[in-house]
Image: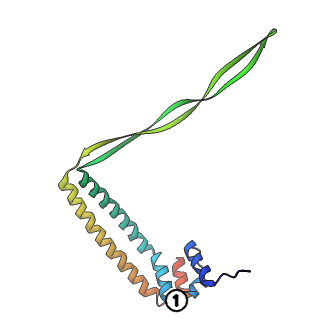
Amino acid sequence: MKIISYPVVLIASLLSGCVSLDDFKQMDASQRAEYVCNRDHAVEYHERKISTFENKIDDISAALDRGYRVHKSCETISFEVPDKIICKNIEKGNKTYQECYNRTKHSYEQVCSETPVPIAVELEKENLHKYEHLLEDSVEERDANFEYCYSDVRLMSAEQAYYRYKQ
């Protein structure tokens, strides 16, 4: 019989997101603080803001590199597609006829067109700088929230850290 060591089980439970009080007791204070604070609501909020600002910066940078934006317009169209040919035999008197018809089904397709749209280069550059500053501020706020949480949770017992994590 193969016995799985507790550290392997602990790592697997941490990765799956199912962490128990016993798992917290097996961690040292730094591990608990890191685990709790990476999932802290304020830290996660700033992570989402950072991701949003990074996406906006990438979008503006791509538009500036191209010299234009691409406006995408889509519409869903409906059309009929032949499905099956259905036939049935019809008897009239002593003669048999076959009557057939096409059965159709509705299908939908999204059709998109892309149109290049000129950009206002100066406005795009202003927006780029604005988002770069917002990104910088959000990184600082995330780091400050993490440090505040970390210094607080590091001093907690395993039980206190676990209950903070569960909030």
Counting from the top left corner in percent of width and height, residue 163 is at 55, 81
Q: Residue furthest right?
A: 94
* Residue type (three-letter) at the residue carrying disc 1: Asp
**Residue 167 shown left or right of residue 88 in the figure:** left
For this orientation, the residue located farthest to the front is 1
**SS class of the residue under badge 1?**
loop
Q: Looking at the picture, how far across and down is residue 91, in whole percent?
A: 78, 14
Residue projecting furthest to the top: 93
Quarter assignment of residue 38: bottom left
Q: Quadrant of residue 9?
A: bottom right
Q: Quadrant of the N terminus?
A: bottom right
> What residue is rendered at 41% in x and 74% in y?
43
118 to 62, vertically: above or below:
above
In-front residue for pair 95/59: 95
The image shows residue 65 at horizontal and vertical percentages of 24, 54
Q: Nearer the viewer, residue 65 or 120?
A: 65
Q: Specify whether 132 is left or right of 148.
A: left
Identify the residue under disc 1.
28
Residue at the extreme left of the image, as rendered: 122
Q: How dense is the environment of label 1, judged by Cα within 10 Å: few (below 14), some, or many (20 and up)?
A: few
